[in-house]
Amino acid sequence: MDSINIKQLAEKLKVSTSTISRAFRGHNDISKETKEKILAMAQELNYQPNHLASNLREQKSKTIAVIVPEIANNFFSRAINGIERVARDNGFHVLIYLTNDDFDKEVAFITELHHGRVDGIIMSVTGEAQDHSYMHKIRKKSIPLVFFDRVYDDVITSKVATNDYDSSYLATRHLIDQGCKRIVYLVVNKNLSIGKMRMQGYFDSLESSGETIREELVIDCSNDMVKTTLILEHVFKYLKPDGVFASVERLALASYYVCHDMNIAIGTDVKIVCFSSLEIAPLLNPSLSTITQPAYDMGVEAAQILFRSLENPDDNENYENVVLNSELIIRKSTSGI
Amino acid sequence: MDSINIKQLAEKLKVSTSTISRAFRGHNDISKETKEKILAMAQELNYQPNHLASNLREQKSKTIAVIVPEIANNFFSRAINGIERVARDNGFHVLIYLTNDDFDKEVAFITELHHGRVDGIIMSVTGEAQDHSYMHKIRKKSIPLVFFDRVYDDVITSKVATNDYDSSYLATRHLIDQGCKRIVYLVVNKNLSIGKMRMQGYFDSLESSGETIREELVIDCSNDMVKTTLILEHVFKYLKPDGVFASVERLALASYYVCHDMNIAIGTDVKIVCFSSLEIAPLLNPSLSTITQPAYDMGVEAAQILFRSLENPDDNENYENVVLNSELIIRKSTSGI
DNA sequence: TTGTAGGCGTTATCAG
DNA sequence: CTGATAACGCCTACAA
């Protein structure tokens, strides 16, 4: 780090460090001339205030953390896109943390972040968790936290979600309308709030259409693709579903692979619909019907909420709960040819 | 920030702040008992050393920056995945910056980052640039920089790339072997090094197969999807290509949309191949032949190089140039049914 | 093995 | 309008 520091610059210009600081902070208690002189010289010598020092001095980091299960995923990467955009507009920096759905990592991140590194956190939880008490401890501190998409219901803080229940209800209804009689529901973790909400929509929709609910049609899959494939092969072989409702994109894609393999015609033999942010759903074979979440907008919304509470550090009891609408887009995977 | 600080903890324990510091830094000039006592109390009071302060003191941030054009993109998000993994293993934090292919942003990020916020930078450039002198200035400073995938040839630093030329040569050859006579090459920016390398492979492959090179078959597209679509519609209507080699995934997907629209049969009427990290290329209609880059591995490699130079701050003249191999995977979009 | 003191680079306060 | 000073929280010589 051979950067110049404020003292050296002060030396060069024969002014005090405070004056330099003033020139950079945009205060108005400094004459135009000196300010310009300072800025010019700073430019020349490539001086910029050191962040570490000023952050320490001001007790803030101008940085937020984004904690997500994964990033190589359309939904999360677009949400991060939205977050980054808002952060940048606010002059903030964005740290990324990936949990890979590992609850221990989640706890480690959260714990570590509460010691000056960031001013706020945006997070989509792993859901592997039973005990969220570590979070409650954190909630007592003043650092704002916003959940998005995957949330812990028992943690009181701001949340950005989508109308999962309604979407599930609608999607299931759509499958029923298409004549499906044996609709399986694919889920990764039944206990995660998001899985629960979506599952409830599925159940209620079946019920209100006079269909019987069969617990064995709820399939608990895995985050591991190999395991999931095995499970799905079994499902298609023995359960012979005529409809598949996947709670996450990955499970629908896995179903595609399995159906292609087993020569099951998607759209006719079996109809598939899923939650997905995949832009190219129309290009799949066959094009995939999706419930598309506004990923980017969710990121933007979460970030805006975070920055609002960053600006009003006093009323930290004012939590916001935003629900955005997803869109059911019907394509050939549920409508046949 | 109602966290406790080192002084308060020292007060509570009736020891000096230095002793506490020692307990946390794993030094051995401290008795086991006091260390344990301190750590226990710290745990109880939820004390953790403040990063800002220790970073300032130690003149390092334990943070790296990743600057990429976009994140909602399979290639970059997987590369970031790899980078994050390595960074985490090294106890580092990862800041994300998105340029959206805007050169001014790139300059702003780079410039801003050179004042204490990060210890190193990993970057994939916008390529919109003509003048990289701002970079040269930075190169004189001691903060390490690693390029990956999209690089500036005239900037001397470590680089991680793939064998683009060979892959292009091979892919073009494959199209020729499939009987294509009018192969268009789709590119976003001819002047970007990556575009150039790939284009050269395309040219040389044509030449060595005795085909004539027609400059008009090199199509300069846009980052804007609407514009690109218009351009491609024109191309398919008037140039009537029987082969398409897209230098980036997005252009191949745009071609898919246009072909579907215009009722041009991909795989028979026109064969399409492209650089792509799309996991679900096999599921497209028809399945897409790709040159697949090892995105995750490139991220890992770039990060490892960065950390190596972080560990040896002395020999900053020891730049590494790594070339990983992509894989040409033939599917139905070039092989017909 | 432990404590004391100085400083990392800034900035707010206060005095002039 | 400008300068001196103390403090942000921590870490490392150095001293004991």
Image (cartoon, coloured by chain):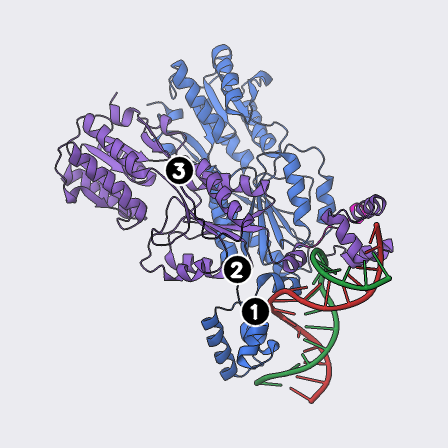
Chain colours: A purple, B blue, C green, D red
Inter-mark Cα distance, 1 to 3: 48 Å
Q: Quadrant of the N terminus of chain B?
A: bottom right
Does residue B143 lie above or below D7 as drawn?
A: above
Which residue type does callout 3 highlight?
Glu
Local secondary structure at mark 1: loop
Which numbered disc flags the more N-terminal residue, 1 or 3? 1
User: Is C7 placed above or below B68 here?
Assistant: below
Residue A67: x %, y % from top left: 45, 50
Which kind of residue does numbered mark 2 sit on?
Asn
Chain ID of residue with mark 1: B
Quadrant of the image occupied by residue B263? top left
| Residue carrying label 2 | B90
At 52% from the left edge and 29% from the top edge, which residue is drawn?
A: B247
Instruction: Specify which label sits upstream in the sequence, 2 or 1.
Output: 1
Closer to viewer: mark 1 or mark 3: 1
Classed neighbour count for the residue bearing mark 1: other residues with Cα under 10 Å, few (<14), some (14–19), many (≥20): some
Out of B150 and B45, give the one closest to the viewer: B45
- Find residue A94 and report its horizontal and vertical position in percent: 54, 48
